[in-house]
Image (cartoon, coloured by chain):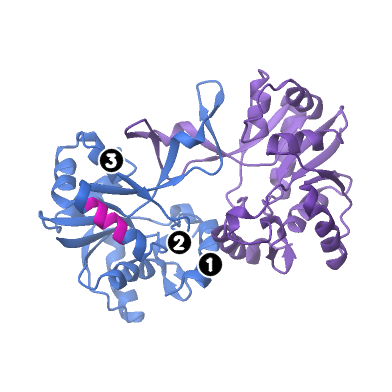
Chain colours: A blue, B purple
Amino acid sequence: LKRFALIVAGGTGTRMGSALPKQFLLLAGKPVLMHTMQRFFDNDHSVEIVLVLPKNQIDYWKELCRQYSFTVNHKIVEGGSSRFYSVKNGLELVDEDSLVAVHDGVRPFVNHQLINSCFDQAAKNGNAIPAMPVHESLRKLNERNNERIDRTNYVLIQTPQCFQSSLLKNAYAKAISDNFTDDASVLEESGIKIHLVDGLKENIKITTKIDMYLAEGLINHFNH
Amino acid sequence: LKRFALIVAGGTGTRMGSALPKQFLLLAGKPVLMHTMQRFFDNDHSVEIVLVLPKNQIDYWKELCRQYSFTVNHKIVEGGSSRFYSVKNGLELVDEDSLVAVHDGVRPFVNHQLINSCFDQAAKNGNAIPAMPVHESLRKLNERNNERIDRTNYVLIQTPQCFQSSLLKNAYAKAISDNFTDDASVLEESGIKIHLVDGLKENIKITTKIDMYLAEGLINHFNH
């Protein structure tokens, strides 16, 4: 099956305390988003990359591609008013009979092993979602209190979240809410069981200034 | 009230893929544990530091202190067979009428603001526990399935966990189980409400090789 990578880069930078959206910040001299896309391209040169970007960032991105001689082939789609609509827009460029990996543009440390395990398991089971154990104590907030929770019953979810494309497209078409934090939740809403695969500790999501510092530590060990 | 810092450093290194326990690994040329203890000392030179270490690491630690001319005053206590018994041992050196911060030896990025807010709130409310929002999607594992969970109802817990010492000593004395992942849970078991304060993103716990890479990224920005 043909493989698509739908890279979602909707960040506007407001959470970074920085004018520049986080996907454009430089990591080892190259925008974060380029690291991310390069990982998918290096994994499989025939992958079809669809990049979803806010409309007002598209010209800037094209300029960055020229400036950094970024030659990884990709199509660009305009983002929507929320993550849900951004993914939905991107899915329009994804073939029905294919596999699609939806991945955060700000997770540049995804690796070959995780990409392949997600695609392979999705081919087999319809979907594959990377999950990590919870390593810190977990508490649940109640109305006026909070209580300890057995963390071994919970997992933290990463991307890439991989799907047989027709299943995900169908789930997005049918969804009656747009209030989802990830694609697994959209699929689950359509009644489908979610299959977990082992996530990757270094596959962090860069959403704050501190995350950029963490990424600087990782890049020395996981650079291409 | 007198302030105690009970630093728990029970790690045996098995999770690091390294012979050296993680608290002794070098960060910016200095063992992780020294960074951690220095933070408490710099915050308040009159703090009483109690370090809990596995018995077979005590000589090595003393040698490290000589080698690195580490002059932060502290007492050393032998660890127990689990975290519960290690803390319990350490509490024997803590005055009844005082405040105690129990802190992971492998969280070297704790800062003045967090230490002070924990001590201050514990003085007021009996206890204060740092909590962070969950930034990734959360799923709950069931026997044969898993389901999405509203992450906004959950928080991830850090240290230092601060207490009026008599309350914590009493909770440890009364506990009928030793199966706790943190001290807030021990206190809660004794029927006391847990008070949360804002945690700190960079206050990571170094338990794997990847965590050391993350710490290397942080240390350039948060070095003393």
Left or right of A173 on screen, residue A111: right
Q: Chain under label 3?
A: A
Chain-order first, disc 2 or disc 3: 2
- Kindly check if marks 2 and 3 are in contact, taking CB atoms under 8 A apart as contact: no
Instruction: Report the disc number at residue A19.
Output: 2
Say what secondary structure mark 2 lies in.
loop
The answer, for residue A218, to whether it is visible in the render is yes
Give the magenta-colored segment's residue range. A116-122
Q: Which residue is mark 1?
A: A216
Count neighbours of disc 2 (C-alpha within 10 A) and say few if under 14, some if 14 to 19, many if 20 or more.
Answer: few
The answer, for residue A81, to whether it is visible in the render is no
Left or right of B187 on screen, residue A35: left
Instruction: Report the disc number at residue B151.
Output: none
In three-dimensional space, the C-alpha distance between marks 1 and 2, rounded to whole angstroms, equals: 19 Å
Q: Amino acid under label 1?
A: Glu
Residue A58 coordinates in the image, percent (x, y): 27, 66
Query: Which mark lies nearer to you, 1 or 2?
Result: 1
Residue A111 coordinates in the image, percent (x, y): 38, 64
Is residue A121 highlighted in magenta?
yes
Chain-order first, disc 1 or disc 3: 3
Chain-order first, disc 1 or disc 2: 2
Q: Chain under label 2?
A: A
Which residue sits at x=64%, y=67%? B220
Is residue A76 highlighted in magenta?
no
Q: Amino acid under label 3?
A: Ile
